[in-house]
Amino acid sequence: MTLLLLAGTAEARDLAQRLAALPGVAAVASLAGATRHPARLPLETRIGGFGGAQGQRKWMQGNGIETVIDATHPFAAQISARTQALCAGLGVPYLRLQRPGWQAQPGDRWTRVPSLAAAAAAVPPGATVFLATGRQSLPAFAGRDDATVYLRQIDRPDAPFPRTRGDFIIGTPPFRAEEERHLFKRLGVDLLVAKDAGGPAGAKLVAARALALPVILIDRPPPPPGDVVTSVDAALAWLARVRPCD
Ligand code: NAP
């Protein structure tokens, strides 16, 4: 069986490891190419966008893809919606593997908002904000020149930081809560803005709790219709159901 694993998350890495050891499955991983030096996966890996829906359909057909597991980030809504629709059209089983979202604990000062724009609007005047929301987050803060914004990035962007107050903060996950705490204190952060990415670490949230910092947490988009699981074990059980190996 030839399987496409849409990757880009820790779960995708775990699943790649398990798939590599699974007899009867020829799995190919796909990365968007968003980071310059992605960790190697133990599977044949293609890197870069497919060039839109048509390109992806052609690639899937050309490579005889019979099953797709989508383990992209919970906020990678475009690729998930598109792949689900493509699979439905091609009659290929599609599974969304999406880790559970975070749950507030005692001491957390979270405000949930539906979007990055809503997060930008909810920032108090003149605040120093730590944005842990990814590369494309700055435009949402264009109307908030009063705020100082620190944006975490994995790779240092080629262009200089485009705002008068703030900077890029370069760092590669996973982060440790203690390091996050020191970082927030050093930067004088008043507020953390994060996506409800889920996952075991949540170090920035642990640090925010320890410092009693308010957090604006952006809700995740709904998953595409169809089969959704929240763990690698459940993904493998799904695979055994849809494509029993000899
Ligand atoms: P997106 O908005 O859903 O997709 C944007 C485009 O990126 C897609 O149209 C596709 O390009 C390409 N793409 C996305 N995932 C791909 C994959 N696994 N293999 C090949 N092409 C892929 O996604 P995004 O939010 O930009 O995220 C891009 C990647 O970074 C995802 O794979 C995701 O897992 C990872 N990531 C995202 C976040 C986040 O917060 N969004 C955080 C951490 C990691 P074409 O149209 O050219 O095919």
Image: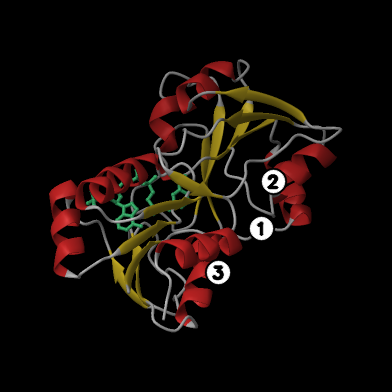
- Is the residue at mark 3 in contact range of ligand 1, meaning its CB lies under 8 Å from it? no
The residue located at (56%, 30%) in the rendering is 218
Query: x, y (%) of residue 109?
Result: 77, 27
User: In the rendered image, which residue does mark 3 sit on?
Assistant: 14
Query: x, y (%) of residue 156?
Result: 43, 56
Q: Which mark is residue 204?
A: 2
Compared to 133, does 178 lie above or below? below
Q: Earlier in the sequence, mark 2 or mark 1?
A: 1
Q: Are marks 2 and 1 in contact (CB under 8 Å)?
A: yes
In the rendered view, does 77 fall on the left or right side of 2? right
The three-letter code of the residue at mark 3 reads: Asp
The three-letter code of the residue at mark 2 reads: Lys
Looking at the picture, tell me which residue is in the foreground, 11 or 142: 11
Looking at the picture, tell me which residue is in the foreground, 233 or 9: 233
Of the two numbered discs 1 and 3 in the rendering, the one whose residue sits closer to the viewer: 3
User: In the rendered image, which residue does mark 1 sit on?
Assistant: 175
Work out how far the residue at label 2 is from the one at label 1, CA to CA, in angstroms. 8 Å
